[in-house]
Image (cartoon, helix red, strand yellow):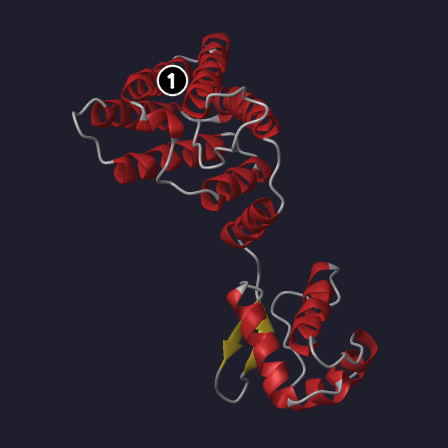
Amino acid sequence: MTTENRSKAMFMPVSVGRASEEIALQVEAAIMDGRLAPGERLPSEREMQAQFGTGRGVVREAIKTLKQKGLLEVRKGAKGGAYIRQLDVDNVSESLALFLKQHPVEPEKLIEFRETVDRAITELAIARGSQLEKDDLLKEALRLEMLLREDDPDLVVTGELDRKLNITLARMARNPLFEWVMHALQMGFSSHDYALYQDPVYREKAAANWSDTARAIADGEPLRALSFIGHHYVLLRQCTEERNGTTADTEVPFLNESTE
């Protein structure tokens, strides 16, 4: 089947008003269900105009949207055109992060999810991570603690380091699904307003807790590591309650919280 005939079978004409959005949705659906494979070229703009029953400007706007979402790459030259991209972890995480932003969940549900994920990741990281990775994790956790003990710590710098620690730990689990989810959590929420790190009292406790957790991981002691993770979430709930003057299951989500 030629590219033109395939496109006729794959796409349906779009309605006026939301034409660009509908084109993008149809192409995205074809990518997601495998009808369009990575490396495959989209039909030409002229072919897409005929198939969707719309103008070239609308087609170009849809292609621009898909490119911004990381689903397409536009090449120039004799073999130029719009090609389906091979999705990587950043693409997947960005989409999941956007979904989480658009579909907020109750704060306590998020805390519960993060604690469950962190426990699973930690156990796997201890079992599968190399000793060099574990020692590096501890080194960076100690550096985070040192930075947060300064009189006026740079919360942007420490936030980035905290994010790096989370992603590193997820990578040590040797399960790409955990890494993708952790990337999404870290990308999806602001790195500038961690509840624990903004409060001087909780800041030192949280930093020390990261170091204790990393040390237990480096020493290959899962029970101690899990105990420290549990304590982290106790601190997190307490801090959130104090900040908002309410219970943890009814307050404003602190979706920006980065945890170990």
Q: Is residue 125 above or below residue 160?
A: above
Query: What residue did someone put label 1 on?
Result: 218
Q: Is residue 165 visible?
A: yes
Q: Is residue 136 visible?
A: no
- Looking at the rendered structure, the number of numbered marks drawn on it comes to 1
Looking at the picture, how far across and down is residue 182, in whole percent? 51, 37
SS at mark 1 in the image: helix
Looking at the picture, how far across and down is residue 175, in whole percent? 57, 35
Question: Residue at 36% across / 20% down in the picture?
Answer: 210
Residue at the limit of the structure toward the left, as seen here: 151
| Left or right of 84 in this view: 19 | right
Quarter the N terminus occupies: bottom right
Residue at the limit of the structure toward the front, as seen here: 245
Q: Is residue 26 above or below residue 244?
A: below
**Which of the 4 image quadrants contains residue 4?**
bottom right
Q: In front: 159, or 200?
A: 200
Identity, as a three-letter code, of the amino acid under mark 1: Ala
| Left or right of 160 in this view: 112 | right
